[in-house]
Image (cartoon, grey):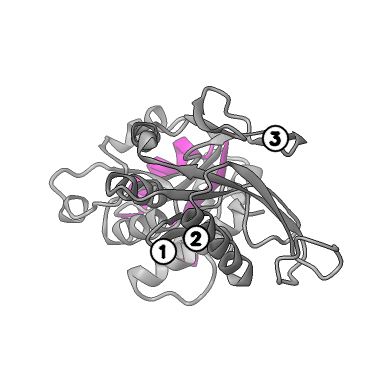
């Protein structure tokens, strides 16, 4: 949400702003749908629409429009190749993206403040008339003409990760996943834990008895779950409940030997091989992690790999 905060702070300082919002992308475009940045009339900017020479050119275009006090929303296509006769971005990564240029003035302060305060399911529309809140959450661009088009999409649409275990690894992973744009639920069965007190990155923190974790974390095919409790016994309690549920990703922290022993016990207790094989364990990409920060990187990398297909 940093870009929205930058916009509202600029507007409150009586600076006009152009919001550059990617409303459509195809192929290997560096700027994906919902990427955004803002350019203020003092020359500063925040966010990204893909970087490189394309972004530089479009930032300069926004600055020129602000200098001229031209405040009309429009769409700008960019093709990342040398084939199209116009609107070439200067990049050769292939693909394309369409960017909405949306002017924002002091009259829009209340709207931007409302956008910042919205929950994870709120949506916006961007049209040739400007930006507005909406109840429609489907992400799409409907184009009829240069003056008749409409983009709708979720404002936040944050991927959700559940981290079960609030120790040092849970703290390091929370910090990294927050930087990567995830909404973080953190769980532990211990009260007054210093690493939970120090965790300013998790969006929600719950102290829960692990035998009840299955009642706390609902199945969701888009959510990610990481199990990293204090030990073998609690790992087993948590995994036994969650392995029956559907998630986008379910991972378990532990050594190869620990995982093998645990899975043999679960097999003997009737857990099907198909469910066990779906668990990412040992968790994370194999980068020979040693520190808690390195473990967090390996887990985050695996989660991102799954998220991005």
In magenta stretch: residue 237: yes
Report, in whole angstroms, how far the alpha carbon at label 2 lies from the one at label 3: 22 Å
89 versus 194 height, above or below = below
Sequence order check, earlier mark of 1 and 2: 1
Q: Position of residue 150 (x, y in %)?
A: 65, 32
The span picked out in magenta is 231-256
Distance between the alpha carbons at the discs numbered 3 and 1: 28 Å
Badge 1: residue crowd in 10 Å (few <14, some 14–19, many ≥20): some
> Taking 187 as reference, is 251 left or right?
right
**Is disc 2 placed on a helix, strand or loop?**
helix
Indicate left or right for 245 with 254 as reference.
Answer: right
Residue 63: mark in rendering: 2
Marks 1 and 2 sit apart, C-alpha to C-alpha, by 7 Å
Does residue 266 show up magenta in the picture? no
Q: Residues within 10 Å of mark 2 (few under 14, many from 20)?
A: many
Give the farthest residue toward the left.
192
Q: Are marks 2 and 3 in contact (CB under 8 Å)?
A: no
The residue shown at (66%, 44%) is: 274
Q: Which residue bears the numbered disc 3?
A: 147
Could you say where residue 162 lies in the image, as x and y percent from the top left? 41, 44
132 left or right, relative to 10: right
């Amino acid at each position: 949400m940093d870009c929205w905060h930058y916009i509202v702070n600029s507007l409150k300082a009586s600076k006009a702003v152009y919001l550059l919002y990617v409303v459509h992308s195809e192929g290997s475009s560096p700027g994906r749908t919902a990427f955004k940045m803002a350019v203020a009339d003092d020359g500063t900017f925040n966010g990204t629409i893909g970087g490189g020479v394309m972004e530089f050119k479009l930032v300069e275009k926004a600055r020129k429009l602000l200098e001229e006090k031209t405040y009309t929303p429009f769409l700008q296509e960019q093709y990342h190749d040398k084939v199209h006769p116009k609107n070439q971005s200067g990049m050769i990564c292939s693909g394309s993206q369409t960017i909405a240029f949306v002017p924002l003035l002091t009259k829009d302060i209340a709207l931007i403040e409302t956008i910042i305060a919205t929950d994870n399911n709120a949506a916006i529309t961007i049209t040739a008339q400007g930006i507005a809140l909406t109840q429609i959450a489907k992400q799409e661009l409907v184009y009829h003409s240069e003056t008749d088009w409409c983009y709708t999409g979720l404002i936040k649409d944050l991927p959700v990760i559940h981290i079960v275990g609030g120790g040092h690894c849970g703290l390091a992973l929370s910090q990294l996943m927050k930087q990567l744009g995830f909404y973080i639920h953190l769980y532990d069965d211990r009260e007054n834990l210093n690493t939970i007190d120090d965790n300013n990155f998790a969006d929600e923190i719950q102290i829960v008895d692990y035998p009840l974790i299955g009642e706390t974390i609902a199945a969701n095919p888009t959510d990610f779950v990481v199990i990293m409790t204090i030990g073998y016994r609690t790992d087993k309690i948590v995994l036994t409940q969650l392995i029956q549920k559907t998630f986008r990703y379910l991972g378990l922290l532990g050594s190869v030997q620990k995982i093998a022993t645990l899975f043999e016990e679960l097999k003997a207790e009737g857990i099907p091989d198909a469910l066990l094989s779906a668990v990412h364990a040992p968790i994370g990409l194999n980068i020979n992690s040693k520190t808690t920060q390195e473990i967090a990187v390996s887990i985050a990398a695996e989660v991102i790999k799954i998220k991005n297909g």
